[in-house]
Amino acid sequence: MVHVIREDLLKQLPATVEPVSCTGILSHEPGRMVSQGAILTNSRWMATLGVLSLTAIAVGLICLHFGAQPIAYGEVLRALFDTVSLKDSTDETSDIAKTILLQVRLPRILLGFLVGCSLASVGVALQALLRNPLADPYVLGVSSGAALGAAVGILFGVGTTFLAETALPACGFAGGLVALLVIYRMAATYGQLPIHSLLLTGVILNAIFSALIMFITSILEPNRSYGMMAWLMGTLTAPTYGSLVALIIYLSIGLFLLFRHMRVLNILALGEESARTLGIDTEQAKRSLFMVTALVTGAVVSVSGMIGFIGMVVPHAVRLVIGADHRLLLPASALVGGIFLMSADTVARTLIAPTEIPVGIITALAGGPFFVYLLLWRKDRLA
Amino acid sequence: MSGTSQHQSIGMMRSDSIPLLGRGPAYDVESVRFRYQSNESQAARWILDNISFHVQEGEVLGVVGPNGSGKTSLLKVLARLMTPQQGHITLFGQDLSAKTQREVACLVGVVPQDTQMLFPFTVAESVLMGRFPHRARDRWIGGFGWESREDLAIAAQAMMTMDIVHLAHRSVTDLSGGERQRTVIARALAQTPKVLLLDEPTAFLDLQHQVEICSVLRRLRDERGLTVVLVSHDLNLVSQYCDRILLLDHGQIVRLGVPDEVIEPEVLESVYRCRVLVDRHPSTGLPRITLPGRQLSGEN
């Protein structure tokens, strides 16, 4: 009896594990499993990012159209074309519209796009790093550290001088870095940098920084304290092109460094131990990723305040739709984050124009229900 | 007990039938001591206490022992996830601690105990991640790097070996425990390792897949000379499928040898503090253990 069973097994086994030809199972050629989205292919990558880039440009144009006074799309395009081709406008009346477009709306929309991009990218990185799909810079306390730095700057009058543009981001940086160093120092007392102690440290730091920010807000004169409240809630104000260029240079360095880590993020998302068995020096990877995210966050917070929803909801939503591979998730989330914040800011500045609402409120109110809808919709699809 | 002589002859036969033992050691572990660092209190006990042994290239070594005997710690030390405070380990003749994490990952695949996954990677994507250590070198384009044709072929092969081809497009977060386990083993195989370290690989598997995975491990050993170190609670599984067994207790080696030398009632009873019955597997003749059941008297 027993022998019969064993022979059966032996007969059955080679059939299940027979090494056969591999073509068609995983290949870059359009095969069965590729069409089911089993792996990320070059063509899917290009298609997704292409569509998102075009969407970003289209949304940008729509955002240029809207404002306290809508400007016709034809005029928007003409103004942009004139600027690109360095042609002087001949029409007197369109000069005002052109000034509004180029000096007020365009820089602000670009700023919104950049801030959205950065927040979403940082969110993606932190979620993989902390293996927490709901993590963002705020959980770690890096944002509130940066905000505290900027708040201290405002308290000592930096915000009202001509130094504001260059000094406030520096204060934000400093604050973000201080938060980072404290987090790292506290977590490092355990020898390694275990991820849950990192999270806990972030929670505690957040509480302390928030208290200090509230303290500073409460001792400021009422009119300055109002400005700071608005900034803390998250506002985008039209920057000069000089400061915009500085921000672009800065963020592109940060984002380039993040993008170099896309495959590492894939592996880190499996967990620290698995990542090490797959050949990653996790301590070093965590250190550099953490540094980059802190610096990008510091810069972003100093120009836009606490826009806290994008870093969490955009990566999560994008992941639900396109999957978890960071080679696509990171750039796609960056584009979606940019599109999202551009649109939200347009709503914020037009909804009850000429009064503006802090864009942080709009992002939270629009993003929350969208997130719930997406979750429910996906659940329907899965069932 | 009737057959001391039979017992020994089977033991002899078994050790003779290991064809690859002449190859030299894959691992050479020399008086290794390891303990967890706990804020400078010197009282922390040694999890691994003065352990020395060899893992032969091309053998399947089973590591057994009671809870907390140091099995998983031993595996982690071998995988270079933890560094022992004393002693040293060589991997194919080279100092393990001198290797980079990536160099180790090209030689050693690890299947951890906890295979929980949080992010919705597809099964095919997670198996392909096993190719990472071989492709991690191209740092500048490393962020974008696509898998080569060879990577895809190796991953497909690993998926076929683990019988998960039909799951390729599924998200790892939606898999059953057994499917996830097989995905993780496939990922380790995609690393094309020379040594495979597995921590309780059959814990979530049903009977069919338990038998299948153990057979696959033996087949890989026969065909590719894969060295396997397998931690398990299942003494019978280890006895049937491993060439040699290492029995740990309190961080020390109690016995190391072919199943007949380790699966002995007196040894097991002293280590596990529980009575066991040892007889023969009806078809392989290897030792088999049974728990005493309810009526304790009259047996053995």
Image (spheres, coloured by chain):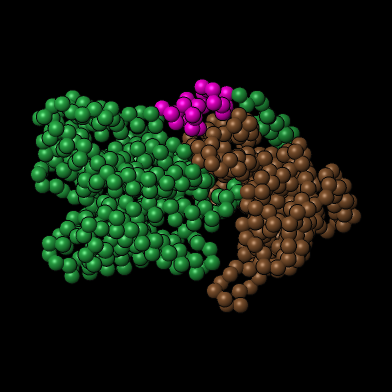
Q: Which residues are magenta?
A: A24-47
Q: What chain is the brown one?
A: B
Examine the rendered structure and indicate whether residue A23 appears above or below residue A70.
Answer: above
Q: Position of residue B260 (x, y in %)?
A: 80, 54
Instruction: Name the residue nearer the viewer: B284 or B257.
Output: B257
Return the residue found at the far bottom. Answer: B42
State the residue at coordinates (54%, 30%): B166
Image quadrant for the N terminus of chain B?
bottom right
Q: Is residue A42 magenta?
A: yes
The residue positioned 37% from the left and 43% from the top of the image is A315
Residue at (29% x, 46% y) in the render: A242
Quadrant of the frame with the C terminus of chain B: bottom right
Q: Nearer the viewer, residue A223 or B159?
A: A223
* Residue located 23% across and 42% down the image: A108
Visible in this render: residue A334?
yes
Q: Is residue A165 left or right of residue B27?
A: left
Left or right for A296, reference A187? left
Q: Position of residue B144 (x, y in %)?
A: 50, 37
